[in-house]
Amino acid sequence: MPELPEVETITRNLRPALLGRQVVSVGLFWPRTLATPAAERFAEQISGQRIEQVTRRAKYIHITLSGGHLLIHLRMSGDLFMRPSPYAAQPHDRLHLMLDSGETLVFNDTRKFGRVWLVDQPDEVLGKLGPEPFSVEFSSASLHTALQSHHRQLKPLLLDQSFVAGLGNIYSDEALHLSGLHPLRQSDTISYEEAGKLFDAIRAVLQTGIDNNGASIDWVYRGGSFQNHFRVYGRTGEACLVCNTPIQRIVVGQRSTHFCPGCQLRA
DNA sequence: AGGGAAACCCGAACGC
DNA sequence: TGCGTTCGGGTTTCCC
């Protein structure tokens, strides 16, 4: 389930194989993968375009083309990788982009949640995203202000991509534990000092994830090792690494939430 | 405005 | 063993 560190890793790995290449042709095996535009026009619109930039914004992979922008969201089970052409479609392959390099960019997605956009303006897709966690716009002070401006539980707020962009279920749980904050705390009760701890924790868990090439969870994304550093995620009933209290699992906003009742007081 | 639920999906895990 | 059921995960959309 690619979150920011996993997407960062995938983007970094793909960039050298994509930069400067031209899209020769397209294979589309699950039309609903295309969020926009219409499937029948996608191939003709993207063919012949050159890849000028490969970056990441939140959990989106942003491929700047000579005449547009390709945005890819892997959602739960999506994966993106290069294979030598010609490449016969494998189970769960949704989209192939054949490049002039003799390689094919493969979008494989078991659960069909992933989406691809081809737009003129990236903001059509990225416009509502909140601050990038590592940007200068995101600071201890801005986080505190933003927390004060809502009356919401911390966990769902961290998952809200318009609040801060890129945190998923795993990294939210990890950040809350690292900062010692209960997932059900109301955002407007967070002090300036606590906001500072949360800010540091968000950056720390994401950076550790990136340093470990992301986390290998499920059978989908592989390669990273951050799962070996989880403090609470998936450790229900196991001892907290800080205070030995058994990690508890609750459901918040339909999402499984892991926390330590010893370190993360609800007060 | 916030929160709950459903929808989109499928393989793994579980229950019998 | 084999079947049916439940679950999880990111995001959007709808409803209260």
Image (cartoon, coloured by chain):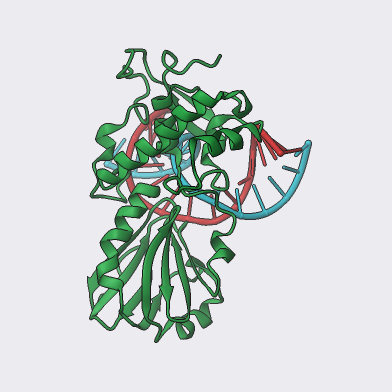
Chain colours: A green, B red, C cyan
Q: Indicate whether A6 appears above or below A85.
A: above
Can you give x and y, in whole percent of width and height, for residue A224 in the image?
Answer: 25, 46
Residue A1 in view (yes/no):
no
Is A197 displayed left or right of A161 in the figure? left
Can you give x and y, in whole percent of width and height, for residue A151 in the image?
Answer: 66, 31
Is A260 displayed left or right of C12 in the figure? left
- Residues A76 and A202: in front is A202
Quarter assignment of residue A216? top left
Quarter assignment of residue A157? top right
Can you give x and y, in whole percent of width and height, for residue A12 in the image?
Answer: 29, 59
Is A25 displayed left or right of A191 in the figure? left
| Count of all numbered marks drawn on residues in the image | 0
The quadrant of the picture occupied by the C terminus of chain A is top right
Q: Indicate whether A138 appears above or below A79.
A: above
- Residues C13 and B9: in front is C13
Residue at x 47% of width, y 29% of height: A196
Q: Indicate whether A143 appears above or below A50.
A: above
Residue at x 36% of width, y 83% of height: A25
Can you give x and y, in whole percent of width and height, for residue A38 in the image?
Answer: 56, 76
Residue at x 56% of width, y 36% of height: A156
Residue A235 in view (yes/no):
yes
